[in-house]
Image (tube, grey):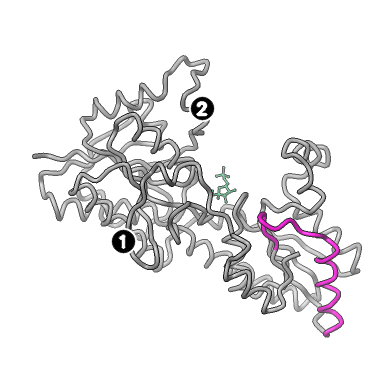
Amino acid sequence: MKKRVGILTSGGDCPGLNATIRGAAKALYQRFGSDVEIIGIQNGYSGLIHGDWREMQQHEFSGILTRGGTILGTKRTPFKMMRVIEDDKIDKVAEMKKTYKNAKLDCLLCLGGNGTHKTANLLSEEGLNIIGLPKTIDNDIYGTDVTFGFHTAVDIATEVLDRIHTTATSHRRCMVVELMGNKAGWLTLYAGIAGGADIILLPELPYNIDNVVEAVLRRAEEGKYFSIVAMAEGCFDIKEAAMKKKERAAKRAENGERTATNRVAMQIEKATGFETRVCVPGHMQRGGSPSPYDRVLATQFGTHAAKLVEADHYGVAVAMKNNIVTENPLKDVAGKTKLVPETCDMLTVARRMGISLG
Ligand code: F6P
């Protein structure tokens, strides 16, 4: 019997999406031969809503292992709006179900992060056969030790910190590097350790600026006249931590601040006398070719999804647990975020190293 397998990529892109698509497609062709049709949905759930899909050819999955971004295109279609009828009067859930039916899909692979998994679970609850695959540079998907895209971003961010180090040393400056991660600090924590940051600030641990200043001054007393601060974009200080989210956002808007990074740099400069500079690598952390680690992980995840299709095992999200590729029920993953816990080994490593966590 023919299998028609849909694939979409949703949310922010990251390296490894194409490698995962390729892993799933190649393994499906291996298992089903000409009995499988792969249907590419364009631009994530938006394509599913608007019926933007096409049958793909086997050769389209070759030559994409190393390619960054996603050959299917992606879009952020917020989960909270999925059941809301907007001005266009479109019933998004009904349309997605209609497209699934029109494309005669047997199942749908949804590659994405937390938002993507929430909608994947919604579709699963609506009776569609769904498999989620965990992508994000933030590494914050519940139930998996790692997501594809994360390690490539760690590599990129580490290179930024390495390069910042040499110029910081030459100029005896304090460099504040803002890394991606709004809620979760995994990327900053790992890159911070790999790149030898002296101060690591995470959204999970509101910082006290006095501690940051003290760390810079202590280093100077030890004869180290430069410092590197790696801070996640979602960081806030202890005063902001005591505020409600809305109040915090209003205060930031009043001060023209998107993140706390520039403020931290200015506060350090004022309190220590060290010249300070800010570096924001931004979307570079999400661009380009996946690292070998992520190519392997993406291939593991993609081929596992193909195995699940063969077993007609749906309503699950692929995951890595203790080095074993497995899957979790979608309903257990949806709506949860894997933040850096206070008990995280890597925080202990940082503390043992004398790295200030603010
Ligand atoms: O979720 C991945 C991520 O890169 C976050 O680290 C960052 O906050 C966000 O996406 C940026 O999103 P956008 O693509 O909308 O700029």
Q: Which mark is residue 342?
A: none
Foreground of the two, 230 or 142 = 142
Between disc 2 and disc 1, whose residue precedes?
Answer: 2
Tell me residue 340's x, y (percent). Answer: 59, 59
| Residue range (magenta) | 201-222
Q: What residue sits right under mark 1 in the picture?
A: 300
Determine the image quadrant of residue 301. bottom left
Foreground of the two, 167 or 225 = 225
Callout 1, which amino acid?
Answer: Gln
Q: Is residue 205 magenta?
A: yes
User: Looking at the image, is 276 positioned above or below residue 24?
Assistant: below
Tell me residue 125's x, y (percent). Answer: 35, 32
Q: Which mark is residue 81?
A: 2
Residue depicted at 26% across the width and 57% down the height = 303
Give SS at disc 1. helix
> Image check: 301 left or right of 151?
left
